[in-house]
Image (cartoon, rainbow, N blue to C red):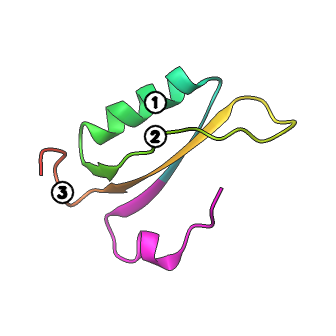
Amino acid sequence: MREITDAHVAVPGLAVVEVAAADDETAFAIQELLTARCAATPADRTTREPGEPGVRLRFFLNLHEDADT
């Protein structure tokens, strides 16, 4: 996964969320729950690390904006 940079969390209210889950369906369900509440840049795919169980999903939230904005 790419490195988290200062720009991703430059001001209070910006967050990088990384989900570790057993499968894609679970990871995307968690993303859907969070992005329904606040503005986000959702991910469209998970990643798998060789030799490690499950999947990872990283997306970005802006807590200052509603999801409908």
- Please rate how many residues cluster around mark 1, counting C-alpha atoms within 10 Å: few if below 14, some from 14 to 19, many from 20: many
Secondary element at tag 2? loop
Tags 3 and 2 touching, CB below 8 Å? no
Q: Classify mark 3: helix, strand or loop.
A: loop
Q: Residue at x 21, y 61 (%)?
A: 64
Q: Quadrant of the N terminus?
A: bottom right
Mark 3 or 2: the one toward you:
2
Q: Name the residue that disc number 2 marks.
A: 44
Amino acid type at circle 1 is Phe
Residue 7 shown left or right of residue 13 in the figure = right
Q: Residue at x 66, y 34 (%)?
A: 55
- Please report whichever mark, 2 or 1, sits nearer to the chain's N-terminal start: 1
Drawn side of residue 42 relative to residue 16, left or right: left
Out of 49 and 6, give the one closest to the viewer: 49
In terms of sequence position, does the residue under pointer 3 or pointer 2 come before the other? 2
The residue that mark 3 highlights is 65
The relative height of residue 4 versus residue 33 in the rendered view (above or below) is: below
Q: Position of residue 29 (x, y in %)?
A: 42, 26
Q: Amino acid at mark 3?
A: Glu
